[in-house]
Structure formats: C-alpha cells, structure tokens
Image (cartoon, coloured by chain):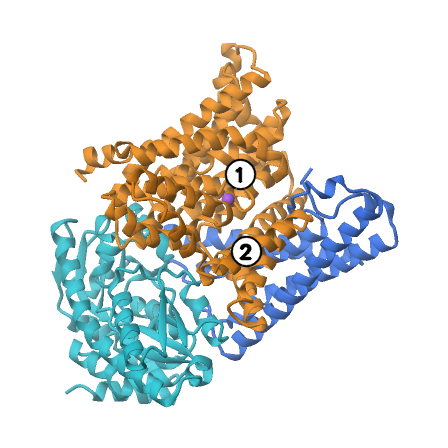
C-alpha cells in the first residue's frame, strides 16, 4: 500500500515538474522569439509551483526526509526512543489534520463558495488551494503507517528515525 | 472595537495618510468606541490574501483596488473600463455618489462591504518611446496587471500585453524584457520607474481607485450610529484624499521631468477611445447588473 | 504581546527540541500564537492559507529549477568537467573549491538576485565535488550558505528593489551601485576565512597541472561554461527575466547531458526530477510555514515591542545603531528576509532618519544584516537550501558556520559605522 502511494505521488511530481518547466520555457519563447507573450503561463507556473511544493512535501514526509534538529533524540534508545518517535508522529499528524485538512478544507470551501477566480486563467481559487488539504491527507496516511510500523515493532523502522539529517 | 486594516503601501503613501484621516475621524465621531489600526506594507498579507482573511472574519479591514476586487465581486469591473469616465469630475461624482455606494454594498453576500474609494489618478502608458497614438503600441510588449480587462485593453490598442510581477518590473524595463508598462505618474518616482523608462504619454486610459473594505462580521457588529460615523469619516477622507492625490501626482510628474529626465507627452485621446470602445459592450454583455452599472455611469456625466 | 512572543518562541522551541521536523514546528507554533488574536477556525485558516500562498513569490519560483539544473549537471557529467577546470585554475590555493563556491555565488547571485537560487544552483554542483575531494560536507555547506547572500548586495538585487518600494522610492540606481563594495567585501572576507580553515584542515592541493592538462580541461569546460554565458547573457540582453533564466538553465543542461554527452538517458529523468522535487519541498514547506510565523508576529505586535525595548536603551547614535543591528539579527534568526524588511524598515526608518543616516546607506545596512539572518538557525532560507543541497544536517553545519558569522558580523559593523563604504560609489558615479 505504502509503495503504491509513494509511486503515485512520484508520478504526480514528475508530471507537475515537467509541466512547470515547459510552462516557463514557453513563456520565454512566446515573448522573445514569437513576439506574442503568453498571458497565462505566469499564473499557471505560480500555481503549479504551490502544488509541487505541497505534494512534494507529502512525498518527502513519506521518505522521512524533512529536516529536524536531532540533538536530543539522538541520545535516546529503546522504549524512550520509540516513545519520542510516536510523539513526533503524533504532533505532525495532528498538525496535518487540524491545520492542513481542517483549516485548509475551510479555506478551499470558502474560496469556492465566494466564487473567487484567478485573474488570468479565471479558474476558481479554491482549486489552487486544494493542494493543502490533499497534501495533509497524504501526510496523515504516512504518519499512521509509520506509527503502525513502530507499534508492531518492526525493528528496522524503530532504529531509524523517521526524520533527521539527510545522510 | 479595534479594526485592523492591512494595505500594501508604505506609510508615506497618500492612501495611507488618507486612511489615517478616516481612522482619526471615526474615533472622534464614536468617542473612541471604534478604532482603526493600520498595518502598512502588507504586514498581514498580500492584497488577495487579506481579502480572503476579511471574508473569513480573520481580519476586519483591508485596502485593495477595483482591479483586484473584480475577482471577488464583478460590479467593480465597470469602474475598470478604459475611458468609462469622461473627466476627473465625472469619476469623483460616481465614486462619492449613489452608483459608488451601490458598488460598495454589492458584495455584502460575499462576506465583505466596501467602505471608501480613494482615487489613484489616471493610468497611462510609459516606456522607452512616446505613445502618441494606438499605432505606436503596435508590436510593443507592455507589462499589464494580470487582469482580463487590462489584457483585453492592450490587445485592442494593438500592443502585446505581458504579465510580469510588480517586483520584477523595474529590472524588466531596464533590461528590455518589456518595452513599457502602464500606471499612474507616481510609479515613476515611488517605484523609481522613471530611472529606466524615459517617456510618459498622458493617454489616461483608466482610473482605477483604491477600495477600503470591511468584513461583514465586523460590519454587522457595529451599531447603526457607528456605521453612519464610518461612512461619514470615509466620505470626509475621500474628499481630503482627492486634493492630496492631485498634489502628489503633480509633484511626481515634476520630479520625474526634472530629476529623472522623463519626457511627458500630451496625447490626442480620441483614437484610443475609439479603439477600446468594444470593451464597454463586451463587459455589459456579461450580466444585467454590469450593463445597468455601465449605463448609469455613462449617464452620470453632467 | 509579551504573551504572544512567549507562546510563539516557546512552542517552537519545545517542538523542535523533541525532534519535530522544523517546517511542522514553525507551522504549529504560528497556529497556536494566532489563537491569541482570533478564534480556532480563523487561526487554522490563516496558517493553511500562508503555507500555500506564502510561496506565491517570483523569487521563490527559481528554486525548483536551479535545484533541478544542479542535479542534471551532477548526473550528466557537466559538473565533473567544470570542476576539472576549476582545479587547474585554482588548485594551488588552499580550499580552492571553497573559493570557487564563493566566487560562483557572487557571480550567480549577482545576476539572479536570489540567495536561495544561488545556494541551490552553486551548492548543488559544488558540494558533491567537494565531497569527492575529501572536504567535510558540513564545511562546504557552511561556505555555500554564508556566501550565497552576496548577490543580494551585488546588483541587480530584488531585495534592494523591495526596500526601495517600502521606503517610498529610495533611488534604486543609487542602492544598486551602493551595494557593490559591501557585497564584494563580503565575498572576499568569506574567502579569506574559508582559505584559513582549509589550510588548517589540510584539504588537498592539486598537483601543478601541465599545459596539456590545462588545455584539455579548458576545452572540456567550454560547453558547460556556455550555461553561464546563456543565463547571464540572456538576462542582461533582456531575453528573459532572472526567474525565467532558471528554466532556461534546465533546458540547456538537459540538452547537454542528454544529447551531447549522453551520460544520462530519458529513463534517468524521473529519478532526477523526483530527487529535485524532494529537495525543493524540504525548503519550500519551511519557507511557507515561516511566512505564517512572520504574520503571527505582525498580528501579535511583536516587532513593535522588540524595537521599542531596544530603542529605549540609549540616545547615543552609536548605541542606537548597534541596538538596531542587534534587533535585526535577532529578528533574522526567526524571520525570513522579505517579511523582516517589510515589517522593520518602516519601524526603524524614522529613527535612523533622525540620526541623519542616509536612506541608501540604511538600505545596505539592513540588507547586509538580514543576509546574515537567512543563514542562521532555526529559520533561515539559505540555511535550509544549503543543508538540503549539501546533504548535511542543520545541527552539523552550525559549528563550521561560526567563524563565518563572526567575520560577517564584524563587516556589518564596519558597513554600519563607515557610510563611505556604501556611499562613495553612488556619489562618484551618479552624483548621488
Ligand atoms: Na544581485
Ligand atoms: Na535565521
């Protein structure tokens, strides 16, 4: 299951990133070479960028690669370490549930209800903000999945911190 | 109650000063019961963000402009049409009168109401060359705000509308990424565009006012007397603002000419008006409400 | 507002100490602080909004592209050729690669005007090579982090444009020219420190190259160096903006690696892109959350409280300027550059104007100060990017950063108390 989520997110990231590159390159080509500047690429790029950052953030959480300061947690071992891992996952999961899913969900609902559209593309702003609750949901899934691994005592997971330095 | 008001200009800006006049006056009229606290430089968010916060009751007041507000309430697009106003008097009659009040109140269902309009003068083209007729815009890359009406207007005039973010515009003008832009004369001095764009052509195509809005939650919590006081304070500050804006605008033109070496061109407007006239019908065709507003604005010329 | 400050910093400190990833710790601290000024629903709304909308800025858009271009260069054999070239040029200097890194940041940052873009682009290429040469990754990341903001002072600079807008139109031309000397001094002094440390640690000196080797390395590096010509030439000639240049860099490196060198194939692209997306997101999630934190500080009037406290200390101009600098350094630890500029410039401007300080000079002092801030933990965009592309952790990079902080602070005082460093060039060249 987790590998399916991983690879789905990976596909989405590759797709969004590729469109983003094409979009900005087209902006240069249309203005500098064709002389008829595109009036939509600028906005499209900015919104794809938000999606890239948030979906990428969810994928990164799944890889356990968000930066944390591990000075204290490095000293721990055994049960204490397990507990500290669970607390961290709990805090991250709560943040995602309360701020990203609940708060972000309200943001999406309200901007859709008020009918706000983006200036150039005229798409509902709520769709742009949809990235927040979406990423939040995926992050909650990863937190639960990591917590289950910890609970079932999968030793490899328990030894390796879910978050920490990059190498 | 203390109402927080967010806007994205520096505290020396004429709009900030006029909003402070409104704040002082409303405190005076309500014996200090209603205070407005102004946060300059977008400390609490960008214009779009603060509109969203206002709609969610997280922020009481914000200053935006008629162009950005199009995304939140369509009535504002009537004000953004090129050459919809025949003169400065016409413009002032509309924003201080019944039509202006109707537009300010039109958004009550969207979670906010307009409180005041502040003129930001007329916008004109400027750049590396004089624009004496629409023919001079042919093939010219003109930076526009990312709004459908600004894009359509430049298209109708024969130019190539180019959305570039405000923060990148100075460099874009300097390096020639765009050939020109459009704004009021203070852009030459406050944004220093006069350092990199040496021709300002007074075609005065649009008059897009600043708009101060209040969230419906904050408005509903005010008593009837407090609402009347707010309206009175707003109208008084709008009157003061008109004079201070004109002074600031004249000073900007003089500074741009004398210190930055910008040439200011007066322009025969008729060919510009003729070219953009189709826009009035296009926008009127969008809804009955807009058609009615446009007709009323045009009828308000005396 | 004292309670706001306490809550914000307390919550943040506690969460990071127990090991919560920084992005989430910042976001949670901001959400808790907002509860002081608004109800629960409103405060989670505003934090969620800022996490996405805080990223809606043109300087940030360059980050993913330069990170991607850097990864393509590493995997596609481009970086390797550049480094061979750098070694024949400066191989006899202690810490030659570190000097390359600083110089590249000065050039690149100068043109792109973005510290984080420079850190991503230059660090992305340089750090694997430095590792190969036996440099400690934490040291190379520290050099990259400390030197990436030089381009914010060396023109053109988006930061100085923002400062001009906030102050109601300080001459951008004057600010740009004023930034040259402080920016170059910053780069040179960092190179001196980097060289001393490299010598102490005994990082390898390349053997003296033969003319044949020099010729070969130069010939090999011509196409990779073409990237610099295309990116810089394109910006200067007006073909594209600094942000768009980042996407052009991706296309150029891709063509070179895929078609010319053929060191990677289309099948390698998904993993390169995913890797770049991860690095990008690590940084951007933290930046989005820190924008929410800046808003929480503004709502809580923390900036005013801080500046009031500091400015009440003395009436002596030298002490006031020192107090302002210290206040900004403290601010810089927690706040990203643009919000710090937006909030504090109007607070301090009237004070320094009373002292008779020139607004151009103050703009340079402010920018210089906040350049240090983006390199300091716990919240610093340059620090975040530098650690991510350098493959090192924030806790590991602090120690090697200390000597760089020290020299930057000394230089900051020099720039503050010697206006001539900033104002001589604008006076000579522009008659300012
Ligand atoms: Na620069
Ligand atoms: Na910092």
The reply, left or right, for residue B31 in relation to residue A105 is left
In the picture, which quadrant includes the C terminus of chain C?
Answer: top left
Query: Chain B colour?
Result: cyan
Q: Which chain does the numbered disc 2 sit on?
A: C
Give above or below for C233 relative to B64. Answer: above
Residue C3 appears left or right of B260: right
- Above or below: residue B220 compared with residue B4: below
Q: Which mark is residue C253?
A: 1
Image quadrant in which you'd find residue A137: bottom right
Q: Residues within 10 Å of mark 2 (few under 14, many from 20)?
A: few
Secondary structure under the numbered disc 1 in the rendered image: helix
Question: Badge 2 is on which residue?
Answer: C6
Q: Where residue B1 sits in the image (x, y, percent)?
A: 41, 77
Q: Which chain is blue?
A: A
Residue at x 21% of width, y 69% of height: B122
What is the CA distance from the residue labelled 1 to the residue labelled 2? 48 Å
The disc numbered 1 marks a residue on which chain?
C
Question: In the figure, the orange chain has which letter?
Answer: C
Q: Residues within 10 Å of mark 1 (few under 14, many from 20)?
A: many
| Residue C418 locus on image (x, y percent) | 29, 32
Is residue A131 shown left or right of residue B262? right
């Amino acid at each position: 299951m987790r590998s399916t989520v991983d690879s789905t997110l990976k596909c989405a990231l590759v797709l969004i990133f590729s469109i983003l590159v094409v979009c900005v390159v087209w902006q240069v080509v249309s203005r500098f070479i064709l002389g008829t500047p595109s009036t939509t690429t600028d906005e499209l790029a900015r919104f794809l960028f938000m999606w890239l950052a948030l979906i990428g953030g969810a994928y990164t959480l799944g890889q356990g690669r968000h930066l944390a300061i591990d000075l204290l947690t490095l000293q721990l071992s055994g049960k204490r370490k397990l507990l500290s891992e669970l607390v961290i996952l709990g805090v991250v999961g709560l943040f995602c549930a309360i701020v990203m899913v609940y708060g972000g969900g309200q943001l999406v609902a309200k901007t859709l209800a008020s009918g706000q559209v983006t200036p150039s593309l005229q798409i509902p702003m709520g769709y742009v903000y949809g990235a927040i609750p979406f990423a939040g949901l995926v992050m909650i899934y990863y937190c639960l999945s990591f917590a289950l691994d910890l609970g079932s005592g999968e030793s490899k997971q328990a030894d390796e911190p879910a978050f920490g330095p990059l190498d | 109650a203390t109402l927080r008001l967010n806007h994205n200009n520096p505290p020396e800006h004429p709009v900030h000063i006029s909003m402070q006049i409104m704040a002082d006056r409303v405190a005076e009229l309500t014996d200090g019961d209603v205070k407005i606290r102004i946060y300059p430089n977008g400390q609490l968010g960008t214009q779009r963000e603060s509109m969203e916060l206002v709609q969610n009751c997280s922020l009481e007041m914000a200053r935006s402009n008629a162009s950005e507000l199009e995304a939140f309430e369509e009535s504002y697009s009537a004000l953004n049409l090129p050459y919809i106003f025949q003169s400065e008097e016409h413009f002032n009659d509309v924003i201080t009168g019944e039509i202006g009040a109707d537009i300010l109140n039109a958004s009550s269902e969207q979670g906010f109401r307009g409180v005041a309009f502040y003129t930001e003068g007329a916008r004109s083209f400027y750049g590396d060359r004089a624009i004496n007729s629409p023919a001079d815009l042919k093939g010219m890359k003109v930076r526009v705000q990312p709004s459908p009406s600004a894009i359509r207007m430049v298209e109708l005039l024969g130019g190539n509308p180019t959305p570039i973010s405000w923060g990148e515009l100075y460099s874009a003008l300097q390096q020639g990424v765009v050939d020109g832009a459009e704004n009021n004369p203070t852009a030459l001095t406050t944004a220093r565009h006069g350092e990199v764009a040496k021709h300002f052509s007074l075609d005065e195509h649009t008059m897009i006012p600043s708009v101060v809005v209040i969230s419906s939650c904050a408005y509903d919590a005010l008593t009837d007397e407090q609402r009347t006081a707010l309206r009175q304070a707003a109208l008084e500050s709008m009157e003061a603002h008109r004079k201070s804006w004109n002074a600031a605008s004249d000073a900007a033109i003089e500074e741009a000419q004398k210190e930055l070496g910008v040439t200011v061109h007066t322009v025969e407007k008729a060919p510009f008006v003729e070219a953009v006239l189709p826009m009035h019908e296009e926008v009127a065709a969008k809804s009955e409400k807009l058609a009615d507003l446009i007709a009323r604005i045009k009828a308000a010329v005396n | 507002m004292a309670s706001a400050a306490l809550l914000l910093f307390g919550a943040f400190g506690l969460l990071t100490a127990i090991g919560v990833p920084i992005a989430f710790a910042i976001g949670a601290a901001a959400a808790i602080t907002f509860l002081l000024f608004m109800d629960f629903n409103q405060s989670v709304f505003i934090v969620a909004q800022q996490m996405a909308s805080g990223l809606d800025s043109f300087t940030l858009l360059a980050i993913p592209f330069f990170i991607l271009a850097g990864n393509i260069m590493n995997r596609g054999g481009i970086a390797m050729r550049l480094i061979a070239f750098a070694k024949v040029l400066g191989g006899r200097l202690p810490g030659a690669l570190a000097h390359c890194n600083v110089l590249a940041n000065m050039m690149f940052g100068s043109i792109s005007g973005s510290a984080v873009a420079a850190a991503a682009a230059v660090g992305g290429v340089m750090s694997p090579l430095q590792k190969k040469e036996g440099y400690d990754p934490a040291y190379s990341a520290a050099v990259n982090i400390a030197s990436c903001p030089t381009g914010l002072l060396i023109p053109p600079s988006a930061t100085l444009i923002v400062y001009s807008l906030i102050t109601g139109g300080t001459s951008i031309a004057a600010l740009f020219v004023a930034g040259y000397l402080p920016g170059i001094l910053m780069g040179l002094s960092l190179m001196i420190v980097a060289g001393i440390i490299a010598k102490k640690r005994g990082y390898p000196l390349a053997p003296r190259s033969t003319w044949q080797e020099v010729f070969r390395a130069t010939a090999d590096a011509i196409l990779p160096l073409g990237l610099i010509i295309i990116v810089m030439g394109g910006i200067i000639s007006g073909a594209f903006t600094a942000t768009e240049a980042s996407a052009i860099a991706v296309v150029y490196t891709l063509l070179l690696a895929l078609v010319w060198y053929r060191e990677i194939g289309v099948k390698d692209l998904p993993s390169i892109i995913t890797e770049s997306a991860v690095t990008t997101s690590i940084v951007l999630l933290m930046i989005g959350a820190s924008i929410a934190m800046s808003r929480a500080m503004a709502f809580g009037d923390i900036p005013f409280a801080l500046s009031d406290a500091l400015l009440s200390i003395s009436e002596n101009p030298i002490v006031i300027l020192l107090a302002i600098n210290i206040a900004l350094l403290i601010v810089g630890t927690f706040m990203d550059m643009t919000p710090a500029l937006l909030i504090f410039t109007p607070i301090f401007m009237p004070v320094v104007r009373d002292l008779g300080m020139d607004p151009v000079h103050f703009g340079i002092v402010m920018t210089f100060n906040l350049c240090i801030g983006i390199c300091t933990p716990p919240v610093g965009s340059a620090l975040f990017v530098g650690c991510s592309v350098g493959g090192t952790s924030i806790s590991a990079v602090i120690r090697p950063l200390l000597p760089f902080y020290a020299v930057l602070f000394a230089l900051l005082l020099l720039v503050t108390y010697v206006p001539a460093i900033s104002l001589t060039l604008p006076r000579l060249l522009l008659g300012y």
